[in-house]
Amino acid sequence: MAIAGAAGNAGASALGGTDGSGGVGGSAGSGVTATGGVGGSQSLPDADTPAGNIVPNPSFELESDDWVPWNSHVVVRTSSGPCSGSWCLVSSGRRESWQGPAFNMAAYVTPGQRYVVTAWARVSVPEDQLSIAMKVLCREASDTTTASQWFPVAAVRRVTNVWGSLNGTFTAPECEAPKQLQDLDLVFEGSAAGVDIYIDDVLIVPSDE
């Protein structure tokens, strides 16, 4: 989302003066006119995001290292048909139904806290299915054999090539000492191999219910 910046300051004189300085988010005023330049646009990505959303870049208007491919395929931002704004995320080159985009949320959750998830999704085919799961890895630092555990977040539902919402809940895990939380991902999965998964406007907010 973008808002207009403040107008630039006026040039020093009506003819040949020095350029005025731009206001916050605005462009500088030109010295050849007596008035400041028109305010530019100031980028405020995700300004409409509800307070408390732990996803730092929920509509992908900026690049983010928090979203990764679960297993080997490609997850990138795309400007192809976003749900809102100018960008969304696409997961492509999937060879298995359980592959999909994953949000690494270990640094953003509070252990024991319940969260509500809402996300918008579509697929590259007329109809398929999609779900959301949580991948948890609690283990000691020296442990290299304990595998991740999987928990359902949003049940499998029908999705199409038109944007629709997925909704679910989860409680952030509390690892029992001496185990530590080494990995915590929210994974979008379930569409057939070869189907591209698009997601946008991802909200994960704390809930007291």
Image: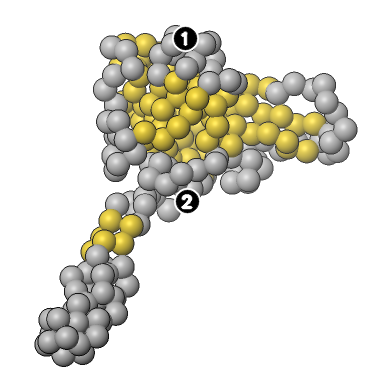
Residue at image mark 2: 52
Going from N to C along the chain, the mark reached first, 1 or 2, is 2
Residue 201 vs residue 134: left or right? left
Q: Considering depth in this image, is 186 or 155 the residue closer to the camera?
A: 186
Which residue reaches farthest bottom? 13
Q: Secondary structure at mark 1?
A: loop
Q: Secondary structure at mark 2?
A: loop
Residue 112, disc: none
The amino acid on which the numbered mark 1 sits, given as a three-letter code, is: Ala
Residue 13 vs residue 49: left or right? left
Q: Considering depth in this image, is 80 or 54 the residue closer to the camera?
A: 80
Residue 68 percent across, percent down from the top left: 55, 32
One can see residue 100 in this view:
yes
One can see residue 118 in this view:
no
Q: Considering depth in this image, is 91 or 14 the residue closer to the camera?
A: 14
Residue at image mark 1: 193
Residue at x 66% of width, y 42% of height: 111
Residue at x 58% of width, y 27% of height: 134
Residue 8 percent across, percent down from the top left: 24, 77
Residue at x 71% of width, y 29% of height: 137
The amino acid on which the numbered mark 2 sits, given as a three-letter code, is: Gly
